[in-house]
């Protein structure tokens, strides 16, 4: 997985920390200009909730497929499954968000006034 980003402020190369790449929401900074990279917490919470719903549904289906004796087993599995799923979801989202920010800044740098007219060079 590619973990390099271009800093939107100073164009220095920033490495995405492992925590972020794994889906743990932490704030990290550009080593050169101290620009902070972060995301909103609401979306992260929503993704966690989605993962919880998915793991509960999966546990229900498994209990139904096997037997009611497996209920305890799958109930124990819900939490690890939840963590796994939410990290998977958040990982993709965090990385995509960082990349989008990078791209937007690069586009803004190409047209400083935000206009779509022909560039004067
Ligand atoms: Zn920077």
Image (cartoon, rainbow, N blue to C red):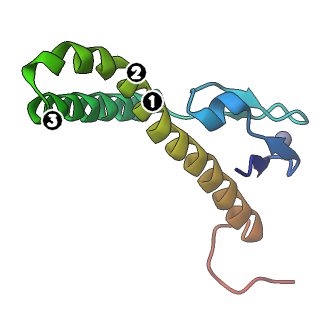
Q: Give the image quarter of residue 86.
A: top left
Q: Position of residue 119 (x, y in %)?
A: 76, 83
From the viewer's side, name the closer residue of 72 and 54. Answer: 72
Please tell me which of labels 2 and 3 falls first in the chain. Answer: 3
From the viewer's side, name the closer residue of 17 and 71. Answer: 71
Vertical arrangement, residue 59 with respect to residue 16, above or below: above
Locate residue 89 relative to residue 113 in the image: left or right.
left
Gap between marks 2 and 1, in whole Å?
6 Å
Numbered tag placed on residue 84 in the rendering? 1
Numbered tag placed on residue 116 in the rendering? none
Q: Residue at x 43, y 24 (%)?
A: 83
Numbered tag placed on residue 61 in the rendering? 3
Where is ligand 1, by quadrant?
A: top right
Numbered tag placed on residue 80 in the rendering? 2
Badge 3 density bin: few <14, some 14–19, many ≥20, Cα 10 Å: few
Gap between marks 1 and 3, in whole Å?
18 Å
Q: Give the image quarter of residue 59.
A: top left
Please tell me which of labels 1 and 3 falls first in the chain. Answer: 3
Badge 2 density bin: few <14, some 14–19, many ≥20, Cα 10 Å: few
């Amino acid at each position: 997985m590619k973990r390099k980003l271009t800093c939107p402020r100073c164009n220095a190369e920033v490495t995405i920390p492992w925590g972020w790449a794994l889906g743990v929401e932490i704030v990290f900074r550009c080593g050169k200009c101290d620009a902070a990279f972060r995301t909103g917490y609401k979306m992260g919470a929503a993704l966690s909730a989605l993962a919880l719903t998915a793991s509960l549904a999966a546990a229900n289906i498994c209990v139904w497929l096997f037997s009611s004796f497996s209920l305890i087993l799958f109930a124990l599995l819900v939490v690890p499954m939840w963590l796994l799923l939410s990290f998977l979801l958040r990982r993709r989202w965090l990385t995509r968000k960082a990349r989008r920010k990078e791209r937007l800044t690069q586009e803004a740098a190409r047209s400083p006034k935000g206009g779509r007219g022909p560039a004067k060079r």
